[in-house]
């Protein structure tokens, strides 16, 4: 074992190598910044990135919402036809789904019907 102390390149304090995180690609096998500086850097980085990520999502949500709104408006008929066709083509499948659903949820459906009648 060679050096026991190491100077941090950020805070310029001389600390024990144990206060530096391991980084095998460095000559001495330790990071050039001490643990507390690394921690601070990471925190700042995360905070900066959090703002970026938030902003990115915000900007894109607006964009995505606007796009899907105009898409739905423009393609209303296409979507309606598509849904109709989908139902037609998958009628049996959809019916079998709803049969299974009704079978599995018999009591719940009966209770809901009763409730509706009461209203
Ligand atoms: Zn430091």
Image (cartoon, rainbow, N blue to C red):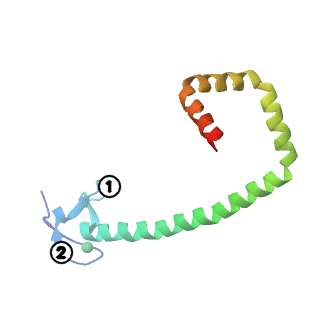
Q: Position of residue 21 (x, y in %)?
A: 25, 60
Q: Seen in the image, is 80 located left or right of residue 118? A: right
The quarter of the picture showing ligand 1:
bottom left
Camera-side residue of 60 and 77:
77
Q: Would you call the spot at circle 2 few (<14 residues within 10 Å), some (14-19), or many (20 or more)?
A: few
Q: Which residue is mark 1?
A: 25
Count every numbered label the image shows and give the total. Answer: 2
Q: Earlier in the sequence, mark 1 or mark 2?
A: 2
Looking at this view, name the residue that lies furthest to the front: 118
Q: Is residue 70 above or below residue 81?
A: below
Which residue is located at x 80 percent, y 25 percent? 89
Q: Quadrant of the C terminus?
A: top right
Q: Tell me if 9 is positioned left or right of 64 in this view.
A: left
Ligand 1 under 8 Å from disc 2 Cβ: no
Tell me, for residue 14, which label it has, or none: 2
Q: Residues within 10 Å of mark 1 (few under 14, many from 20)?
A: few
Quarter where residue 57 is shown: bottom right
Residue at (50%, 69%) from the top-left corner? 51
**Residue closer to the observer: 68 or 119:** 119
Q: Residue at x 65, y 22 (%)?
A: 99
Residue 8: quarter of image: bottom left
Q: Position of residue 101 (x, y in %)?
A: 60, 27
Callout 1: helix, strand or loop?
A: loop
Image position, residue 30 (x, y; %): 25, 60
Question: What's the mark number on residue 72?
Answer: none
Q: Nearer the viewer, mark 1 or mark 2?
A: 2
Q: Are marks 1 and 2 in contact (CB under 8 Å)?
A: no
Q: CA distance from mark 1 to mark 2?
A: 21 Å
Residue 81 lies, with reference to residue 66, above or below; the image says above
Drawn side of residue 51 relative to residue 5, left or right = right
Residue 32: give x, y in percent of width and height: 29, 67
């Amino acid at each position: 074992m060679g050096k026991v102390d190491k100077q941090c390149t950020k805070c310029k304090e001389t600390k024990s190598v144990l206060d530096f995180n391991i980084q095998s690609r460095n000559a001495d096998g330790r990071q050039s910044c001490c643990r507390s500086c690394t921690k601070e850097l990471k925190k700042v980085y995360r905070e900066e990135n959090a703002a970026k990520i938030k902003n990115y999502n915000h900007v894109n949500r607006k964009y995505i919402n606007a796009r899907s709104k105009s898409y739905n408006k423009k393609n209303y008929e296409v979507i309606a036809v598509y849904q109709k066709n989908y139902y037609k083509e998958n009628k049996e499948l959809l019916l079998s789904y709803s049969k299974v659903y009704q079978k599995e949820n018999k009591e719940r459906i009966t209770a809901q019907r009763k409730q509706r009648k009461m209203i």
